[in-house]
Image: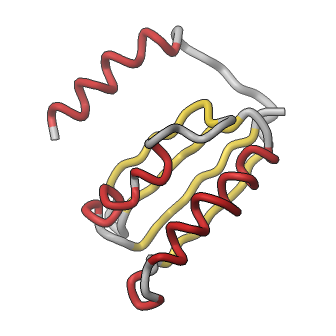
Amino acid sequence: MVYAVVGDVAASWERYECLAAAISEPAPAGLILHVAGPTDEGFRTIDLWDSKQAWKTFRSSRLQEMASALPASLRPRSTLRGLRPINVVLGADLSAVAPALSDLKEEQ
């Protein structure tokens, strides 16, 4: 069953960019989609996983390892909220979205 996680993190966008490797190199097993962007309070991430177990595996391995590597004073405060979607609507073929996402990276 698909599982979503929304994270609000009280840290700068630059901090996100430093941490982004934990979710992108290589993409973790079970990850369907990861989006992130700056907010007034820091940054927000939205992940869509193929199962709650895939999220738990990522969280307990790569995410915990990354956090443990930082000194306690540098660990960002975050609020993670899980969601078991009842309704998922895909408005376009995800492969069609990939070029637009690449354009976003180039604009930064």
Residue 80 position in % (x across, y down): 62, 63
99 left or right of 46?
A: left
Rendering coords of residue 4 (x, y %) = 68, 43
Specify whether 62 is left or right of 88. Answer: left
Report the front residue among 87 and 31. 31
Residue 10 in which image quadrant: bottom left
The mark tally for this picture is 0
60 over 34 or under it: above or below: below
Residue 28 at x, y = what percent? 59, 41
**Quarter the N terminus occupies:** top right
What residue is shown at x 31% (from left), y 55% (from top)? Answer: 17
Quadrant in which residue 60 is drawn: bottom right
Residue 95 position in % (x across, y down): 47, 11
Determine whether 32 is above or below 51 in the image: above
Seen from the viewer's position, the closer of residues 98 and 79 is 98
Up-down: is 65 above or below 108?
Answer: below
Q: Quadrant of residue 71?
A: bottom left
Residue furthest left as drawn: 107
Who's the residue at 66% across and 52% down the image?
A: 58
